[in-house]
Structures are given as C-alpha cells and as structure tokens.
Image (cartoon, helix red, strand yellow):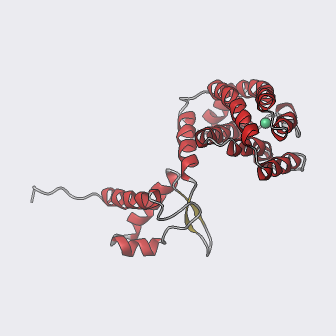
C-alpha cells in the first residue's frame, strides 16, 4: 500500500477554505452577510466539524470574516478590499519590517492628497458626517481606544470621500497601524492630538478649496507625525516586553 500517501486533515481544510474564499470573492456572500453555519458547512462539504472550524478560523485570520458570538452570531463577511491590505500592513509592522518613521512618512505624503481630492469630490452627506465627527471629538471618553477612534474618524471619513478606493484602503490601513502604536504607547493625549484640530482641514473641504485642504492636512500631520515618530522606541520596548 506504499503507493498511497495519507491525506492530511489540513489539506481537506484547505480545500474547504478555498471554496469558501471563492464563494466570497464571487460575491455569493457579500460584505455584512453571514456565511452558512458550521453544521450546514459540515453537511455541504461532507467533512468533520473540526475541518470546517479550521477553515473558518483561517478565513477569520486572513480577514475574510469576523466572528460574532450569541444566538444571532456566526461568521460574517467583512469589507474585503480594506481588511486585506490593513492586515498585510499590520503583519509587516508587527514583524518589525515597517517602522513608525516609515509609516509617518507615507501618511505625510498621502493624506494631503487625499484631503485635496476630498475637497474636490465632497457631497452634502459627507460634509454632514465630517461635522458630526468633529463635534464628537469634544465628547468625553473613558478608554484610550475610544479616544483614538474619536480622532481617527475625521481622517477615515476624508479617505472615504476622496473617490479613490486605493487611497482609501491605504489610508485606512495606515490608521490601523497608527491605532496599534498609540494604543500600546498610550501617550499624553493632550500633547498628541487635541479636539478640533481638524478644523481648518474640514473648513477647506466645506469651502471646496482643494489646495487649502491639502496644506491644512500637511500642517496637521507635520505636528502629529513628529510625535508619532518619537513613539518608535517606546513602542518596540513595550511590544518586546509583552512577548
Ligand atoms: Zn488628526
């Protein structure tokens, strides 16, 4: 019987994974939709529950789905275009292959262009979202992560407004890295970012002034990125201790 090699369970799981990925990529299950349950997939693929579980876990790790607990829970399809790039950048960063100064450098050059495009393409609804996000910056928050999310909101909305999905994906992934760093270092937030600091950027976008929006964003990032760069050493020390 030496002609045969035993089939590893992981191979079966890979096959299940590849079919699930294909179904998601072909749009059979769209962003926000739930994929079939473990039991349903076990029946459909005629494999063990462990195999299905392994495939779903791999889908989660690669950013295709998020898992939610509870009676209405399950594996929900994510917004693929952004999560994939974000995950890839985060992996590079965690592996120490991308430094904080490199991240800051890219933010400094990309986001003014993103703001310029946002001022060119702004719609009424976008402006409303921007103003709401700016007002929300002044609301009290109790956790570091809520505080970071509060300040990132304006950057994220501007990226969503810019009309270039590639810029949007890059900006969102840079926000994710920034979030990771600031949350770990937990610096003095008053020194790092104050509520209302995006005022001149938002005003320029409302006035549909692309040039002013770009220079206001550059000015904002000049200050913010300088603080971010200083966090490199302390961030790596903290991560090294945590590991
Ligand atoms: Zn900001």
**Residue at x 89%, y 39% (from the top left corner):** 196
Q: Is residue 142 visible?
A: no
Looking at the image, how many numbered discs can be counted on the residues?
Answer: 0
The relative height of residue 238 versus residue 79 in the rendered view (above or below) is above
Front residue of this view, candidates 170 and 232: 170
If the picture is divided into quarters, which one holds ligand 1? Answer: top right
The relative height of residue 163 versus residue 227 in the rendered view (above or below) is below
Question: Where, by quadrant of the figure, is residue 54 drawn?
Answer: bottom left
Question: Where, by quadrant of the figure, is residue 162 drawn?
Answer: top right
Front residue of this view, candidates 39 and 216: 216
Q: Is residue 87 visible?
A: yes
> Along the horizontal axis of the image, is 166 left or right of 54?
right
Question: Where, by quadrant of the figure, is residue 6 drawn?
Answer: bottom left
Q: Position of residue 92 (x, y in %)?
A: 53, 35
> Along the horizontal axis of the image, is 91 left or right of 193?
left
> Along the horizontal axis of the image, is 239 left or right of 155?
left
Q: Position of residue 227 (x, y in %)?
A: 77, 26
Quadrant housing the C terminus? top right
């Amino acid at each position: 019987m030496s002609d045969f090699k035993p089939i590893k369970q992981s191979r079966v799981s890979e096959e299940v994974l590849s079919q699930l990925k294909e179904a998601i990529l072909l749009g059979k299950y769209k962003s926000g939709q739930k994929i079939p349950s473990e039991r349903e997939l076990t029946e459909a693929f005629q494999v063990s529950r462990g195999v299905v579980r392994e495939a779903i876990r791999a889908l989660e790790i690669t950013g295709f789905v998020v898992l939610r607990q509870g009676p209405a829970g399950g594996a929900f399809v994510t917004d693929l275009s952004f999560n994939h790039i974000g995950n890839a950048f985060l992996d590079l960063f965690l592996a120490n292959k991308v430094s904080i100064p490199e991240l800051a450098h890219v933010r400094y050059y990309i986001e003014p262009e993103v703001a310029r495009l946002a001022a060119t393409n702004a719609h009424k609804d976008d402006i409303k979202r921007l103003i709401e996000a700016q007002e929300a910056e002044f609301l009290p928050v109790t956790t570091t992560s809520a505080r970071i999310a509060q300040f990132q909101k304006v950057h994220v909305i501007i990226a969503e407004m810019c009309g270039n999905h590639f810029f949007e994906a890059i900006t969102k992934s840079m926000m994710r890295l920034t979030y990771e760093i600031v949350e770990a270092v937990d610096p003095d937030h008053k020194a790092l970012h104050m509520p209302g600091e995006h005022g001149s950027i938002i005003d320029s976008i409302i006035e549909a002034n692309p040039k002013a929006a770009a220079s206001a964003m550059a000015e904002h990032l000049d200050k913010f990125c300088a603080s971010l760069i200083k966090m490199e050493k302390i961030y790596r020390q903290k991560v090294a201790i945590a590991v």
